[in-house]
Image (spheres, rainbow, N blue to C red):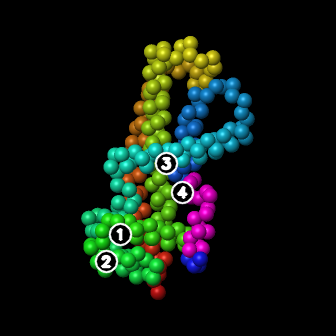
Amino acid sequence: MAAGGSGLLSASSSTFDLYDFFSMLIPGAALVLGVLPFAPKETPVDAAGLVVVLLVSGYIAGRGLHTIAESIDNILGKRSHRDFFVDVLQGTEELLDPATVDEFYDVATTFADSPDLPDDRADASATELETLYLYVRARIHMHGQGRSRTFQAIHAFYRSTHLTFVCLAILYFVFGAGVFFGLFSGIGSFTSYWGTLGLSGNTFVAISELIAAVSLAAFHDAKGDYREYFIQYLLIDFLMIESPPD
């Protein structure tokens, strides 16, 4: 195996990295924390056990949130990182100066192991540019450098956290409505943490509205911004790695 391929294999074998932490563990842990007050108050778990449960269940929930959020984007027709990359290279999306994009394309297509692409990026098909996207991502990942990896993780964090808050808003609204109409009376034989406070159904509805407002204001638009930042830095990172200044 070539040295580059060996490096890529080594870099990709990491089991937990920045992307996992931001895009999966934190949103998943936030979801678990939001659900925990509904658990039985008498749950026999000490502080250390609670931390372990939070980390393990948070990571598992986070992976599920990540997958669901990505599927929702596809269903709603949201453009992916790859779509933005293709649009920038084809000139239908201007996130960077065209001269910089031209330089990136020239550098990315002149390496011996680069995909066989047309000389003019405007002539490249979407499928060809998607192949180039994979190549560029692999090169940057192999070197383990660049800000683009950070912006990708932050984008995924905002997307999954937005979904987390939406799920919690729905949960608290449904629970509040159930308390208001007395739907939960006589159901179950345990007292939850929320149950010990004796809050009214209107209070839970208000909490759900607050969660929804925070989600919309803090995470909805930001996830789109960081998708664009990721593509911008992806091109610049590649140029800095493969064609560094003298």
Please state the horizontal and vertical placement of residue 107, each as a whole percent of the image.
Answer: 40, 80
- Is residue 91 depicted above or below 30 in this figure? below
Q: Which sits earlier in the primary sequence, circle 2 or circle 3?
A: 3
Count residues near mark 3 (Cα–Cα under 10 Å), then give few for <14, some for 14-19, many for 20+.
Answer: many
What residue type is disc 2 on? Pro
Give the magenta part as a residue range: 5-21
Dot 1 or dot 4, earlier in sequence: 4
| Front residue of 129 and 100 | 129
Nearer to us of marks 4 and 3 is 3
Which residue reaches farthest front? 1
Three-letter code for the amino acid on which mark 1 is drawn: Glu
| Residue 157 image point, x, y percent | 49, 51
Residue position marked by numbered label 1 in the rendering? 128
Sequence order check, earlier mark of 1 and 2: 2
> Which residue is label 4 attached to?
19
- Residue 8 sits above or below residue 48 on the image: below
The residue carrying mark 2 is: 118
Residue 66 got which mark? Answer: 3
Of labels 1 and 3, earlier in sequence is 3
Residue 227: image quadrant is bottom left
Mark 2 and mark 3 in contact? Answer it, CB < 8 Å.
no
